[in-house]
Image (cartoon, rainbow, N blue to C red):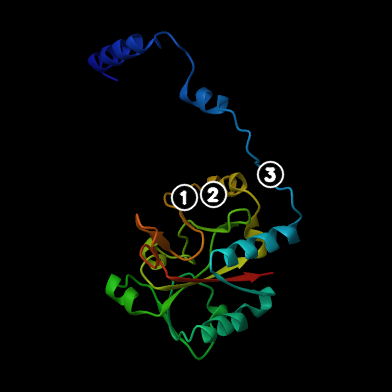
Amino acid sequence: MTTSKSEILGRIRAALGDAGRAVTRVDEYRAIPRRYRQASELDAEAQLDLFLSRIQQYDGGVFRCGRALVRDTITRALTARATRRLVVPPGFPREWLPDGFEFVVDDGLSYQDLDRSDGVLTTCTVAIALTGTIVLHHSPSEGRRALTLVPDYHLCVVEADQIVETVPEAMRRLRALNPSLVTTISGPSATADIEMTRIKGVHGPRTLDVILAG
């Protein structure tokens, strides 16, 4: 830090009454009271049930299956939506892709190409039961951010061991990955104007389906 900059900052601290204070930003952060819940209180099965009920409350569709039946369940979900042509990230598990549909690998597709697709099929990083939130850190099986914003339909495969109960638990998992970008999804995209007219699909997919595997 330059001498002039140090002098200016010193004057500001003095004016604010902070001169000479030795507490660092890290110490200040650690000293913040955290009275909110930071750990699970439900057992594993109750967490799964809570997550699915939250998704349904947000008008999302839910499917549940064993991990060996993910492929068949994707077929069920896409058939129910009359969906045929989906974009998939480069790292999406190929063994989960069923026959009878067109899957286009995103190798840098234009926004126009994404918009012309019927939807997108991805995995996720973690899911939060208490808020019904799917979290992506845009790994190879989750795709770039545009992939989950432009198409009108999002089908996401969530594995049972990816579900935690609280937001702090999810943040701890993300911290271990040190992601540069995170997207959180709580139901289909919806917004309301000043007259409280609710419109879906303005800022992301109009329709969300979740397959819980495991």
Q: Is 84 on the left or on the right of 93, as rendered? A: left
Quadrant of the rendering where the C terminus is positioned: bottom right
**Disc number lying in front (1 or 3):** 3
**Disc number lying in front (3 or 2):** 3
Kind of residue at disc 3: Ala
Label 1 to label 3: alpha-carbon separation: 22 Å
Point 67% across, 64% down: residue: 160
Q: How many marks?
A: 3
Is there CB contact under 8 Å for labels 2 and 1? Answer: yes
Point 58% across, 84% down: residue: 76
**Residue position for label 3:** 39
Point 58% across, 54% down: residue: 131
Q: Which is more toward the observer, 158 or 188?
A: 188
Kind of residue at disc 1: Pro
Q: Which mark is residue 121?
A: none
> Is 145 placed above or below 212 here?
above
Q: Which is more toward the observer, 126 or 165?
A: 165
> Is 74 placed above or below 213 here?
below
Circle 1: is it few (<14), some (14-19), or many (20+) Cα within 10 Å?
few
> Is 88 placed above or below 49 here?
below
Q: Position of residue 137 (x, y in %)?
A: 48, 56
**Residue position for label 2:** 174
